[in-house]
Amino acid sequence: MIEAWTADEMRAAEKPLLDAGVPLMDRAARALARTVLGDIARRRPAAGMPRRRVAGSLGSDGLPGEGRVRPARRAGTRAPARGAAALLLVGAGNNGGDALFAGAHLAREGVRVTAVLVASEVHAAGLAALRAARAEVIERSELRVPAVVARAEAADAVVDGLTGAGSRGALRPPAGGIVRALADVRAAAEAAGTPWPWVVAVDVPSGIGVDDGAVPGPVLPADRTVAFGAYKPGLLLPPAAPLAGSVTVTDVGLGSLQGPQFAGTLRLEDDDVAAVLRAPGPRDHKYTRGVVGVVAGTEKFPGAGVLAAAGAVRAGAGLVRALGPVPVTSQILSRHPEAVTVGGRVQSWVLGPGIPSDGSDAGQDRRVYGALAAVTGVLDAEVTGGVVPAVIDAGAMAMLEHRLPEIAVLTPHAGELATLMSGLGHEVTRADVEAEPVRWARAAHRATGATVLLKGAVTVVVGSGATYAQADAPAWLATAGAGDVLAGILGTLLASRAADVLADHALTSRVAAAAVVVHGRAAALASGGGPVTASDVADAVPRVIARILGGDHA
Ligand SMILES: NC(=O)C1=CN([C@@H]2O[C@H](COP(=O)(O)OP(=O)(O)OC[C@H]3O[C@@H](n4cnc5c(N)ncnc54)[C@H](OP(=O)(O)O)[C@@H]3O)[C@@H](O)[C@H]2O)[C@H](O)CC1
Ligand SMILES: [K+]
């Protein structure tokens, strides 16, 4: 489990150590310098050997290279970082201090270091250390944006030490102008397929919402973020999270302290998902494993019903009851003969995939309303067999008539959440939701009572407890029907843990986050780096569950 600590929680954790004289900044700077040296070394051929074209690589003229040359590391060749260039972007606070001390270490390793100070006052001891290591310093008074851009483009690495945990709001000038210019040239280079220097963010990419993942202004996307002590919520939450690149958390000694009192932002890892999944035991049968009721698909969109059922079946449902018009249920049966198409008791419902919100399929709408009446408890438990958890997707989200229990999970994408919230009286667009996904997911949770699973490159799950932020899926998963499969997977996980979820409604968000991990990992496995269909994703689910449970050693 990855736990993110807010800026305040970090400061509270650091304070006793700093008061006791623990050299946190020195540890942070050393870890940062080691990481930058390693990244530079990996990206440069061994120094001392001429760069030669190698088979399969293209020379500057775009023609195939000569025969393969493997430059041996002859004795005496210099370390790859020696002679490399690093540009430090230095802010006024301790984040800048980390960069300055790290720059001094880099300079002593032979890296040509230039520090750009965006403030007239920066960390004095850090600056002294940098000057003592004979690095170049561009003072605040000498700042010229074009010159900084030119230095950055000529560097092997750019170290972003402008702001860290102390950042508030959009980057102010001159930092904001520098970062905007660098981000623009970096984006243009990437669009042209031109490599750009390696960007390492100190603790967080400067300018993100450290505690909420907002992107209020310009941010220089990082290839790597070296976070000190713990993740910050902004490194897990969208839209900021993808700007952090690969995150390396450096233990600077905080590990000995208790975690945050209330972990606000979490990311599940395999062990946590394994704890949610329930492998059957010798006394299990299909009813104890969980029966999933699926009301999905219409004559016009039968495929969504097939895919939702596929997700449920492949995730290990004891039994799937597929309810709907014959053109839908017959297709489900033809692909999943283990499903049944008659009603009966279920431990969870999957409602809505492929069902439009325009009332065009009265039969499916009636089934959804009936199931929702059971989920909300409006109908007497003796009649319905009791309240059960539910996945409420697509058109079913337009059929909410009562406040939902937290064991109901809404699964919108940004546009659907905007529509839902607009229907509840909030003026909000898809763009608003994409700019502040957690804010609107929390608003939807408060407005409906349901757990909200907001799908995206980083999928957030919000309930009464922690917020989960999962980023397990490859971009290839953005394909038709993927959400239908996720709904089915989630329906099965909820059915398998129905008793626990009913006993502790707050568990719902963790079960939902686990389903997102299974779904994303299945897409990654099925994709293998290329295009993937929703059906492929469903087919890969058993293998992913086996790997997560540790059973699949293939
Ligand atoms: N966690 C650890 O173990 C350690 C963390 N360290 C590093 O310390 C920073 C936090 O340092 P702090 O000094 O509290 O704050 P920052 O350096 O992040 O930023 C404060 C300065 O930045 C200015 N600022 C704030 N917001 C903006 C903005 N939007 N635009 C421009 N400038 C901004 C702020 O100016 P004010 O006028 O607002 O005060 C400050 O000058 C943490 O991230 C780690 O990198 C330590 O090294 C110890 C180990
Ligand atoms: K930073």
Image (cartoon, rainbow, N blue to C red):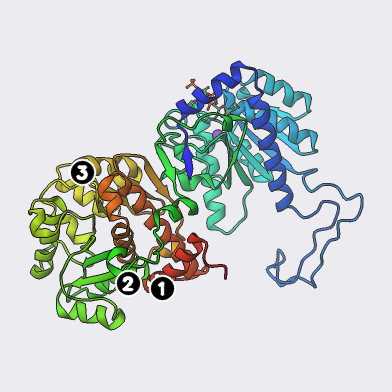
Residue under numbered circle 3: 449
Q: Compute the Cα span from label 2 to label 3.
A: 28 Å
Image location (x, y in percent) of residue 100: 67, 28
Dot 1 or dot 3, earlier in sequence: 3
Judged left or right of residue 323, residue 110 is: right
- Residue 310 is labelled as 2
Farthest residue to the front: give it. Answer: 283
Q: Say which residue label 1 marks.
A: 539
| Residue 118, placed above or below residue 351 | above
Q: Secondary structure at mark 3?
A: loop
Whether residue 362 is visible to the viewer of this picture, yes or no, is: yes
Q: How many marks?
A: 3
**Distance from Cα at disc 1 to Cα at disc 2:** 8 Å
Residue 359 lies, with reference to residue 136, above or below; the image says: below
Q: Is disc 1 placed on a helix, strand or loop?
A: helix
Q: Is residue 484 left or right of residue 419?
A: right
Residue found at x 58% / y 30%: 256
Horizontal placement of 219 versus 505: left or right?
right
Residue 97 shows which numbered tag? Answer: none
Give residue 68's position: percent from left, percent from top: 79, 70
Mark 2 vs 3, N-terminal side: 2
Q: Amino acid at mark 1?
A: Asp
Q: CA distance from mark 1 to mark 3?
A: 33 Å
Q: Earlier in the sequence, mark 1 or mark 2?
A: 2
**How many C-alpha atoms fall within 10 Å of the one at disc 1: few (<14), some, or many (≥20)?**
some
Q: Amino acid at mark 3?
A: Gly
503 or 523, nearer to the observer: 503
